[in-house]
Image (cartoon, rainbow, N blue to C red):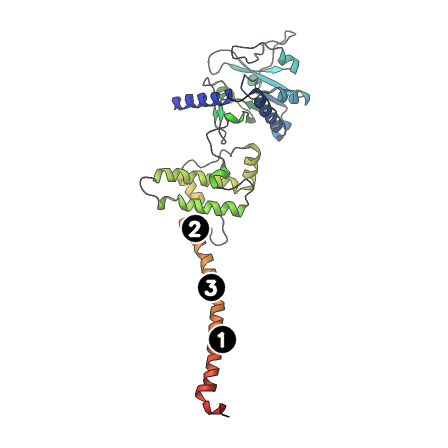
């Protein structure tokens, strides 16, 4: 696990180094626009905004928006080598932040005291934070975070915070597949289209159809597509996913939970559960209906022909002399 994290950090760092300054600025502006448009940002009376190191999403515009809205702003400060050695200090203005000296990582480092000599409030002591903008090396769409390995934020956010918001550039968004991609549908897909896609995939990866060799892989895939459908088939969860790009924390922990949902959690006009048998039933019934619809005209033509033939036979075979001149 440690080597995998190290390799991912290396890959993300290389991807970020490959991007020019103009692209990083463009993405940082886009990040600021999206964050400022969130209701949690608008509602937060106090928030923590990280101070970016080179090749991270810049936060100057976010700080400016927070100060302009008269929010109480806190910024992180590392005070030692231990995971618990971080505090969130009060910053009064953009000018205050601009005056911070840089540390060895080129990150602005807030002094413990304000310029007037008064102590800066520490939000981790007062527990007044309502929103934390969280930096990191990489994130996935489920909200998973890979940091630099020191554990500062992991320890800090263990304290009570109303909302955590992961902020990163595109190169740092990794690891988890988009839920729409998992189902093979577009983001504009209708509920019926998603249900159809899920039926097809759940049949394909259902464990009853797998061999011993690919069973474990299929079960894992089944869990993923079922969780994707669980999120996207729920209007509230889908709206949250579309806005924030992450699924909620109530995903399936194992295959049994996913299978139970596939049996009980999907309503259908023909059946009340969705499993292997239900999928087959949904596929067979339309065929039977179509065959029945095709049979009706043929049956009617046959009955008409039989009636006409019987009438003609009676006229020309049973009573032939009735037609003589």
First in sequence: mark 1 vs mark 3: 3
Q: Which residue is mark 2?
A: 279
Instruction: Say which residue appears at 47% left-offset and 64% top-offset.
Output: 292
Q: x and y percent of residue 180 in the render?
A: 50, 39
Q: Nearer the viewer, residue 204 or 223?
A: 204
Q: Which residue is mark 3?
A: 292
Q: Which mark is residue 39?
A: none
Residue picked out by circle 1: 304
- Which residue is situated farthest in the front direction here? 325
How far apart in space, not on screen, are marks 2 and 3 (Cα)?
21 Å
Q: Provide residue 282's location: percent of width, then percent of height.
A: 45, 53
Q: Secondary structure at mark 2?
A: helix
Is residue 9 depicted above or below 210 in this figure?
A: above
Residue 112 location, quadrant: top right
Instruction: Write down the quadrant of residue 162 in the picture.
Output: top right
> Mark 2 or 1, which is nearer the eye?
1
User: Label 3: how many residues lie within 10 Å, few (<14), some (14-19) or many (20+)?
Assistant: few
Looking at the picture, does residue 125 appear above or below residue 224? Answer: above
Q: Position of residue 289 (x, y in %)?
A: 47, 60
Check disc 3 and report its element: helix, strand or loop: helix
* Tag 2 and tag 3, C-beta contact below 8 Å: no
The residue carrying pointer 2 sits among few (fewer than 14), some (14 to 19) or many (20 or more) residues within 10 Å by Cα, namely: some
Of labels 2 and 1, earlier in sequence is: 2
Left of 204 or right of it: where is 189? right
Can residue 33 be spotted in the picture? yes
Which mark's residue is nearer the viewer, 1 or 3?
1
Spatial CA distance of label 2 from label 1 is 39 Å
């Amino acid at each position: 696990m440690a080597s995998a994290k190290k390799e991912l950090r290396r890959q993300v760092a290389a991807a970020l180094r490959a991007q020019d300054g103009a692209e990083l600025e463009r993405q940082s502006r886009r990040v600021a626009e999206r964050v400022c448009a969130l209701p949690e940002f608008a509602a937060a009376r106090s928030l923590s905004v990280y101070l970016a190191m080179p090749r991270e999403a810049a936060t100057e515009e976010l700080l400016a928006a927070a100060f302009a809205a008269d929010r109480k702003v806190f910024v992180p400060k590392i005070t030692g080598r231990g995971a618990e050695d971080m505090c969130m200090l009060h910053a009064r203005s953009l000018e205050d932040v601009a005056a911070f000296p840089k540390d060895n990582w080129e990150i602005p480092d807030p002094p413990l005291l304000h310029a007037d000599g008064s102590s800066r409030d520490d939000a981790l002591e007062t527990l007044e934070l309502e929103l934390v903008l969280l930096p990191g090396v990489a994130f996935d769409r489920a909200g998973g975070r890979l940091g630099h390995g020191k554990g500062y934020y992991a320890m800090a956010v263990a304290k009570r915070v109303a909302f955590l918001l992961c902020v990163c550039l595109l190169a740092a968004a990794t690891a988890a597949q988009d839920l729409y991609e998992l189902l093979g549908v577009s983001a504009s897909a209708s509920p019926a289209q998603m249900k159809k896609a899920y039926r097809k995939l759940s049949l394909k990866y259902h464990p009853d159809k797998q061999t011993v060799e690919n069973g474990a892989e299929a079960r894992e895939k089944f869990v993923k597509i079922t969780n994707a459908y669980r999120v996207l088939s729920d209007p509230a969860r889908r709206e949250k996913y579309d806005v924030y790009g992450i699924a909620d924390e109530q995903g399936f922990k194992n295959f049994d939970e996913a299978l139970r949902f596939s049996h009980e959690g999907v309503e259908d006009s023909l059946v009340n559960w969705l499993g292997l048998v239900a999928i087959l039933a949904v596929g067979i019934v339309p065929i039977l209906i179509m065959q029945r619809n095709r049979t009706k005209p043929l049956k009617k033509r046959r009955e008409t022909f039989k009636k006409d033939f019987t009438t003609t036979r009676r006229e020309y075979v049973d009573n032939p002399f009735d037609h003589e001149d």
